[in-house]
Image (cartoon, rainbow, N blue to C red):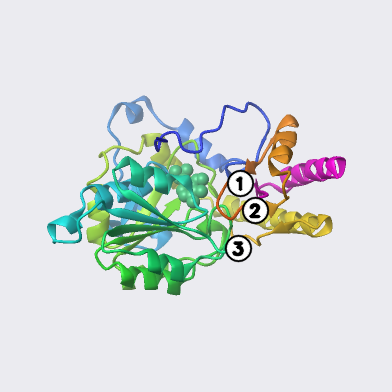
Amino acid sequence: MVTSSQYQREPELGDGLRLHLNENTGGCSPKVIEALRALSPMDAAIYPDYGRVNDVCARHLGVDPSRLLLTNGLDEGIQAAAIAYLQRDPGAAAGAAAGRPEGLIAEPCFGMYADCIEAVGGRIVRVAPPADLAFPLDAVLAAITPRTRVIYLTSPGNPTGLLVTAAAVHALARAVPAGLVFVDEAYADFTDAHFLAELPGAPNVVVGRTFAKAYGLAALRIGAVVGDEAVIARLRRSLPPYSINVAAAVALEAALGDQAHLDAYRAQVRASKARVYAVCDRLGLGYWPSEANFVLVRVGGRATAIVEALRQRRIFVRDRSNEPGCAGCIRITAGVLAHTEQALAALEDILCAVA
Ligand SMILES: Cc1ncc(COP(=O)(O)O)c(C=O)c1O
């Protein structure tokens, strides 16, 4: 069994252009590094307080602090939902259908959902994608059973970059009144379409965010889950009390204070995606216009060979060709424009050589 601590772990790659994990290719705000340098020996010696960073983050997201749970990366929020809803199986006490509690996922999707459902003893229910990889609302609704406890959605989706509409989220929430709809918005900072504002009308929906991507804090491990106060309290009880370390807490506050850094990076991502689309159009490669910081490109049957050829040049992209619906596809992170240009030039070179 693949455990959640091992998901997506690549062999250590060493130096190179990392376009395989949708990280920020330009690095975090320099204000984060300043804040980390300012930590004192006593800051390291005492158990951290989260009141201040929780307030700052809640203000940033426009929610009451009681509706926010900071987590050790969004991974931990995904895991908390699995523990709280799939392991304890609250439905059983209410006389719900017998059998293993089910976690529903629409493929292709982020690997942590299945890993977490399985790790807590839940049953994974997978919904296959349509050919265009659009979110299959009707098929997901049809896969709901009396044992469905959590539905994990991703918007923008990974690896597609496609959105799930608010109407679809509401429809699913209505279909599982005793369960939880977890809207993973890891890439929300790259789009204007969010579910956050809709949350007050959907008490059994939570939104997950990460500061790993747009804010460039992947190594510090900090994410957030927002939702109804009682649901958030239930998720909080699934986690250890000090899962966020002091470095992550001060880093988040500093990162949220540097709007200019975020805006500049988002502009690079937009420019990078435009370049990827232009090169794909020129080379006749299919792609999915993306609301995130990556693009899924259909390079055809040579996908694995192309990823390997790029790797030889120390350019790392993700082979997604074994994911449901993604035959022949690779996923390329779109970050700093110069990095994208470098990857595209290498891709074109390789494609011309094998043509
Ligand atoms: C859809 C999705 N959710 C969650 C995560 C994990 O975020 P974090 O690094 O904050 O744990 C990722 C990381 O790639 C992701 O793609």
Mark 1 or mark 2, whichever is nearer to me: 1
Q: Which residue is mark 1?
A: 320
- Neighbours of disc 2 within 10 Å: few (<14), some (14-19), many (20+): many
Q: Nearer the viewer, mark 2 or mark 3?
A: 3
Element class at badge 1 = loop
x, y percent for residue 170: 38, 72
- Rendered residue at 69%/53% (across/down): 297
Q: Which residues are magenta?
A: 327-355
Residue, disc 2: 296
The residue under label 2 is which amino acid type? Answer: Leu
Q: Is residue 220 above or below residue 179?
A: above
- Is 10 situated above or below 318? above
Tell me which residue sits at (68%, 31%) in the image.
16
Please state if 303 lies on the left or on the right of 66 as rendered: right
Query: Looking at the rendered structure, which numbered label has been put on residue 131?
Result: 3
Disc 2, SS: strand
Look at the magenta stretch and give its main secondary structure.
helix
Residues at discs 1 and 2 in contact (Cβ within 8 Å)? yes
Q: Is residue 351 magenta?
A: yes
Query: Residue 288 occupies which quadrant of the picture?
Result: bottom right
Q: Residue at x 42, y 39 (%)?
A: 248
